[in-house]
Image (cartoon, rainbow, N blue to C red):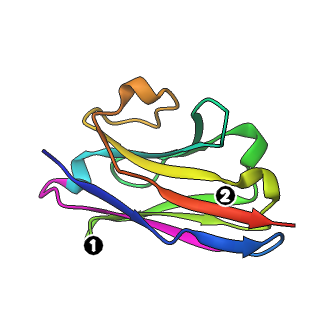
Amino acid sequence: QVQLVESGGGLVRAGSSLRLSCASSGRTFGRFAMGWFRQAPGKEQEFVAAISWSGRNTDYADSLKGRFTISRDNGKNTVYLQVNSLKPEDTAVYYCAAAAWDGTWTDGSKYNYWGQGTQVTVSS
């Protein structure tokens, strides 16, 4: 099974930035579409961002466009999520996921593998 490990979360002040990373153990990382999702306390999981095999195509939740940027480095088997101007409502566990089918999937059911998540907490 492919293993995904997120890192980069933490406790930060509102207005600050973080770069989350997701490292994959897979040998064919470049053939997986990748996505980021998040789940806040008491809320359902929501789509954050997605990126295709090549990294040339991306998609974002409408409410997050302009603040969140997804990217990937296939040579390092890593996908990133740059988050800027963080708000308290961004507090959540952030998960990365891998999909065997190429695309920019916004539906979590499209993804075959999931990481354990990294906690992002934004204080006022």
Residue at image position (37%, 27%) is 110
Residue tagged by mark 2? 68
Percent across and percent down for residue 46 are 60, 35
Q: Is residue 43 left or right of residue 15?
A: left
Q: Residue furthest front?
A: 42
- Among all residues in the image, which is located at the extreme right? 124
Q: Nearer the viewer, residue 47 or 62?
A: 47
Q: Amino acid at mark 2?
A: Phe
Specify the label residue 86 is tagged with: none
Percent position (x, y) of residue 117?
44, 53
Residue 76: mark: 1
Residues 104 and 39: in front is 39
Q: Amino acid at mark 1?
A: Lys
Question: Looking at the image, is 13 positioned above or below residue 30?
Answer: below
Q: Main secondary structure of the magenta part?
A: strand
Magenta-colored span? 18-28
Q: Dot 1 lies on which element?
A: loop
Element under disc 2: strand
Identify the image quadrant of residue 9.
bottom right
From mark 2 to mark 1, how far is it between C-alphas?
A: 21 Å
In the image, residue 90 above or below residue 71: above
Q: Neighbour class for label 1 at 10 Å: few (<14), some, many (≥20)?
A: few
Q: Residues within 10 Å of mark 2 (few under 14, many from 20)?
A: many
Res 84 → quadrant: bottom right
In the image, taking residue 89 as reference, residue 43 lies left or right, namely left
Residue drawn at 47 percent across, 37 percent down: 104
